[in-house]
């Protein structure tokens, strides 16, 4: 095993707790349609699956069905107007990013969120230092679970996939990272539904807090030196 020199993160549900603002946007859209709001506890687990999942639970519409495109466009419009009112970095993330920098480990973001939402959100999050790369859902021709955005991030960061660790809270994150040749961790503190089974996704480990990334890196380095 090579040493980890770059850590890449999913954005929603891994680096930042965006669910409050996305839930507010969905409930505003529901109100505009004369529908009752949904409880936050129902919305939170689907946030990592993006706007299609939000429109599905709010309006029972899937991509391609009549009305879906209009609902999705309006949802994103509402969200873009106020995308960082309640959104915060998860507890421990600032300390994690500072620790990575102190160790000389670069970090970046690979998300399926479109760039017109990703870029202003990243600017407003109050990050302790900027990422070496930000790859959004429309940066490359394919999005996760395809490995293309992961490999694009490597090119920007001048990193080899085998020297990278990807941290995410969805099965697509693990698939994309593994298919790109990276190590992967599942962020159990993210947006994972009751019917999902992260232990079956094939990640290298499951973590319950951001700072456990450092523990995993240290353990991996110990295993490498022991050989």
Image (spheres, rainbow, N blue to C red):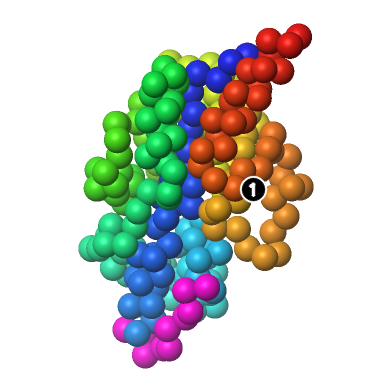
Going 61% across and 43% down the picture, which residue do you hit?
207
Q: Quadrant of residue 204?
A: top right
Tell me residue 129's x, y (percent).
29, 31
Q: Is residue 186 left or right of residue 152?
A: right
Tell me residue 108's x, y (percent).
41, 31
Magenta stretch bounds: 32-41
Q: Main secondary structure of the magenta part?
A: loop
Q: Is residue 184 left or right of residue 131?
A: right
Q: Is residue 74 visible from the viewing direction of this image?
A: yes
Q: Is residue 78 above or below residue 220?
A: below
Q: Quadrant of residue 72?
A: bottom left
Q: Is residue 63 visible from the viewing direction of this image?
A: no
Going 76% across and 47% down the picture, which residue do you hit?
200
State yes or no: residue 196 in magenta: no
Q: Which residue is mark 1?
A: 171
Going 55% across and 64% down the picture, which residue do you hit?
45
Q: Is residue 106 left or right of residue 85?
A: right
Element at badge 1?
helix
Tell me residue 218's x, y (percent).
60, 23
Closer to the camera in the image, 218 or 158 = 218
Closer to the camera in the image, 189 or 72 = 189
State yes or no: residue 40 in magenta: yes
Dot 1, crowdedness within 10 Å: few (<14), some or many (≥20)? many
Q: Is residue 124 above or below residue 194?
A: above
Closer to the camera in the image, 7 or 69 = 7
| Position of the C terminus by quadrant | top right
Going 47% across and 80% down the picture, which residue do you hit?
38
Q: Is residue 177 above or below residue 25?
A: above
| Position of the N terminus by quadrant | top right
Tell me residue 223's x, y (percent).
71, 18
């Amino acid at each position: 095993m090579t040493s980890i020199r770059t850590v890449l993160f999913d954005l929603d549900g891994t680096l930042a707790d965006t669910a409050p603002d996305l839930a507010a946007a969905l409930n505003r859209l529901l109100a505009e349609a004369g529908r009752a709001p949904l409880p936050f506890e129902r919305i939170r687990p689907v946030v990592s699956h993006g706007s299609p999942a939000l429109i599905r639970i709010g309006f029972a519409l899937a991509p391609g069905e009549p009305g879906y495109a209009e609902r999705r466009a309006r949802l994103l419009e509402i969200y873009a107007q106020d995308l960082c009112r309640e959104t915060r970095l998860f507890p421990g993330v600032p300390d994690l990013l500072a620790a990575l920098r102190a160790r000389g480990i670069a970090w970046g973001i690979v998300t399926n969120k479109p760039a017109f939402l990703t870029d202003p959100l990243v600017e407003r999050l109050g990050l302790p230092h900027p990422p070496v790369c930000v790859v959004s859902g429309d940066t490359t021709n394919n999005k996760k679970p395809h490995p293309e955005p992961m490999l694009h991030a490597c090119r920007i960061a001048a990193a080899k996939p085998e020297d990278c660790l990807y941290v995410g809270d969805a099965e697509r994150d693990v698939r994309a990272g593994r298919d790109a040749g990276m190590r992967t961790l599942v962020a159990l503190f993210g947006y994972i539904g009751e019917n999902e089974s992260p232990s079956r996704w094939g990640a290298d480990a499951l973590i319950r807090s951001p700072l456990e990334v450092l523990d995993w890196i240290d353990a991996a380095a110990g295993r490498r030196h022991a050989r």
